[in-house]
Image (tube, grey):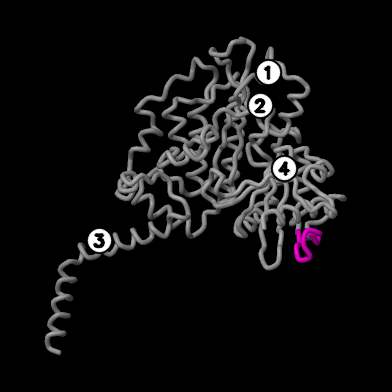
Amino acid sequence: AASITAVALQQGVFELLKTRATTDDTRQCVSGASDCALAEEYCPASFASVRQAFAVDDLTERAVLGISAEQQRSTLLILGSSEAAGKSGAYFFYSPDHRQIIKSCTEGDARCLLRILPSYLQHVERNARDSGGPGTLLPRLLGLWKVTVGRRSVWLLIQGNVFSGCKPISERYDLKGSTHGRSVSDEEKIKHGSACIMKDLDLLTNDRRICMASAEVRDQFISASKRDSEFLAEMGLLDYSLIVGFSAGQVMNGRRMSGVEKTLLAHVWGVPLDHDPEDESPDTMRLAYVGIIDILMEYNWFKRLENVLLTRLMGADISCQPPGVYAQRFHSFMEHISCVGREEAGPFSKEDPFLKRSRHLGPLGVILKRVGISELGKKDWPAIGVLVAGAAVVAFGLHHRKSVAKAVRQLRVHRAMR
């Protein structure tokens, strides 16, 4: 099913991106991969403007992602949900040049994106570096498609790959500013090895700061973080992350990039880092590839309930917070972990405010920590629901134990009289 979906999507891209759309009316293309495969492009004109803001040419997009109707085999690299590092259950396709990721998403995610798309377009047109702006860390959302094969429909989101720079990545971090349960489990380390994506507590306990090459670079990064997090709060969104990848080798020589490297780095935000004294050459400079991901989580009634329950049961610093609170904490963490030069770096102390927050656990947090569960995902909610319901029954019984005992006695008397 995934391969047919990929072929249908690519044939749709090849056919529909021949000309730029002038309206946001949905465009359709019947795939040659299957008589009943249909690819639909949503809001084509708006996404064409987004691509233009990020200097992504439609014809180049068509050449990279599209395949003709005669081709029956996809050129995309498929990464299943079991191989992905996240808990969403989504699966991914990588473009042949790895510059773009096609991610499956829910209908709720798609509707959220369509809701914020006009505001998102204005934000990236005003801030994207390719459009002359100061820069944005927001994901490059380049297209939204729906592929229907038979009776099954899959929503697909095309976006830029943060880690598609010209040098390999040695360390990866997924940072939210939350500390409760935000560390990598032993299972994830075994599963992903050196490609494991570490989290907030791992960065703090490893004393890993983003040591930037100059105050100007840090100011650009912090300003973008503030603008973007405020925008996401205004849109009522939360649960997003800053993904950071530290490059493994030399990326600049004499602090001047070659033309080839500039071309390869044009589609990602590479933050120049301060010189590493362990490097052999004093002219070597490393990069950190950075970008915000997973921005399509709305603060709906379910998230409000999660915040109320888990704040009391798990601890104050859980990931789920109201959008304004989440944005402020996210930006504060970015300020906290970034610095100028290695002289300012230093290790994080045991009294670090973010580390101290991680030690404030509620009753459920203590229990889950003892059984080895760190961060909760959607798949854990049924078990948590049963646990909370059981705890509520016990608490009610203890609080009203006299009334419960009286009711039990009356029931016994009633049975005896029968």
Span shown in magenta: 27-39
**Mark 3 residue crowding within 10 angstroms, few (<14) / some (14–19) / many (20+):** few
> In the rendered view, does 243 fall on the left or right side of 141?
left
Tell me how far mark 3 sits from mark 4, CA to CA: 54 Å
Tell me how far mark 3 sits from mark 2, CA to CA: 56 Å
Reading the image, the residue beneath label 3 is 395
- Quarter containing the C terminus: bottom left
First reached walking from the N terminus: tag 2 or tag 1 = 2
> In the rendered view, does 151 fall on the left or right side of 211?
right
Judged from the image, the secondary structure of the residue bearing numbered disc 3 is helix
Reading the image, the residue beneath label 2 is 167
First reached walking from the N terminus: tag 2 or tag 4 = 4
Q: Position of residue 327 (x, y in %)?
A: 52, 42
Residue 52, quarter of the rendered image: top right
Residue most toward the right? 19
- Would residue 240 be visible to someone looking at this image? yes
**Mark 2 residue crowding within 10 angstroms, few (<14) / some (14–19) / many (20+):** some
Give amino acid for label 1: Met
Reading the image, the residue beneath label 4 is 95
